[in-house]
Image: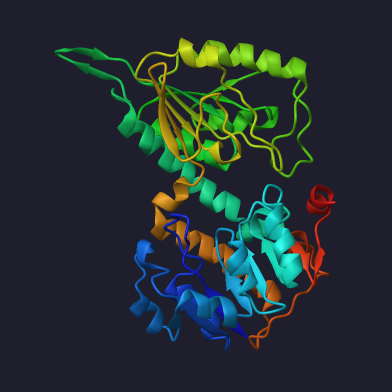
Amino acid sequence: MILGILKENSGDKRVSLLPEQAAVLVAKQVSVIVETGAGDAAYAADSTYTEKNVSVKDRSTVLSTADLVLSINPLSASEMSQLKPGAVVLGTFQPLFNTDLVKQAIDKKASLFSMDMIPRTTRAQSMDVLSSQANIAGYRAVLLAATMFPKYFPMFMTAAGSIPPAKMVIIGAGVAGLQAIATAKRLGAVVEVSDTRPQVKEEVMSLGAKFIEVEGAADASKAGGYAVEQSEEFKQRQQQRLAESIAKADIIITTAQIPGKKAPVLITDAMLKSMKPGSVVIDLAAATGGNTVATKNNETVVYEGVTILGNSNLASDMPSDASKLYGKNILNFLQLIITKEGALELNFEDDLVKGCCMAHEGAVANERVAALIN
C-alpha cells in the first residue's frame, strides 16, 4: 500500500504526519510518499523525511498514486478528480458544512474519512483530533489576547500606582475553554466562564474561574461533549446574564459551536458597545459564523473600539506541537485500517471506522450527511 502526505494549501502550517511518525508506517512495510515541502512550516524538512525512507514527490504524483491520502483540510474538486479510483482520503473536513466534498468522493468512488466526526467515546480519545487541536487553540487564544490587549493581565501594585487585573469572560468550557482558563489564570487574569452545560461548573471552578450560572439549560448529556440547541427562553436569560459580565470584561474568548449548525450568536451589538475601548474578543467559532455579530472569519476587525479576531485554526500557529499531536491521533486511527503487514483493510464492523466514514464505494456512508445531501 502507498500512503501519501499532502502539503496543506490553505495557509495551514501543520502536516498530517511528521517524519518520525511516518517511520512507524514504513516499519510496517507501508510505502510512504510526501509532497515536496509538506513539513517545512512545521520545521520538518524534506531531508528529514528521506532519512526515514519516505519518498518526496510532487503534489500530482501523491494524489494520483497514493492508496491512502492524508490531508488535514479539504481537497479541491480538481484534486479529488486526480485520485486513484477507490482511494481513501483522511482528514478533518467538516462534512456537515462541506457536502460538496462528499459528493465529489461519491462521484470518484473514493472513501472519505473525516476525523472530526469520530464518535466521542472513551476508546476514541487517543484519536480525537478536535480535542488535541482545541487544547492548543485555547492556549494560543489567551497569548494572542495578551499581546493585543493594551494593558497588563496581572494585578500590579507599584510606587507609581496600582494596576487592576484584566477581567476575562470565556464562553464555552470545552477543551479549548478549559485550557484558556488555565492559561489566563497563570497570567493573572480574573476569569468568568459561561457554558450551557451545568456539569462543567466543577471543572471551571477547580481551575480558579467563576462559573456564570443560568438555569433551565437543555440536557446535553447525550451530545458527546458538544453543546446542543437551547430554548429561546434560556437564550434570553443567558444573554441577560452574559451582558452583565461582558460590560465589565476586558477580554472575551468564545468557543461555542454546535456540530452541523451555524455557531450561535451570543454577543450582540449592544454587548459589544457596552465594552470598554481597547477590549479584545478572540472568536474561535469564526469558521462557522462566529459567536459575535461582528466576527469575520480569518480577519481582525475593530468594532466600536473593540478588537475582534476571528480565527478557528489557531492550532496552526503552533505547527510543531499541533502536527505532533494531530499525527499521533492519525497514527492511532490508522492502526484500525492498516494491518500488521501494511495492507489497507477498512473494517466497518468497528464503530470508530464506521463513525468517521462519510463516503464509500460511490455512496454516502453517514446518515447525517445523507440527510443534508438528499
Q: Position of residue 330 (x, y in %)?
A: 58, 66
Q: Which quadrant of the rendered structure holds the N terminus?
A: bottom right
Task: Specify the quadrant of the image occupied by residue 329.
Answer: bottom right
On the image, the x and y values in percent for residue 294 come to: 51, 25
Residue at image location 45% in from the left, 70% down from the top: 18
- Front in this rendered view, residue 40 or 361: 361
Residue 357 sits above or below residue 311 on the image: below
Return the residue nearer the eye: 242 or 203. 242
User: Residue most toward the front?
Assistant: 78
Residue farthest to the left? 159
Q: Is residue 205 above or below residue 57?
A: above
Residue at (55% x, 58% y) in the render: 73
Q: Residue at x 64, y 37 (%)?
A: 257
Residue 179, how many percent across, how many down?
A: 49, 40
Task: Identify the residue at horizontal 73%, vertical 18% (top origin).
Answer: 234
Quadrant in which residue 36 is drawn = bottom left
221 sits left or right of 37 in the view: right
**Residue 52 image position (x, y, % from top left):** 42, 83
Left or right, 336 with reference to 370 = left
* Whether residue 370 is visible: yes
**Can see residue 24?**
no
Closer to the camera in the image, 212 or 239 = 239
Q: Nearer the viewer, residue 349 or 35?
A: 35
Q: How many marks?
A: 0
Q: How is the image coloured?
A: rainbow
Q: Is residue 373 above or below residue 341?
A: above
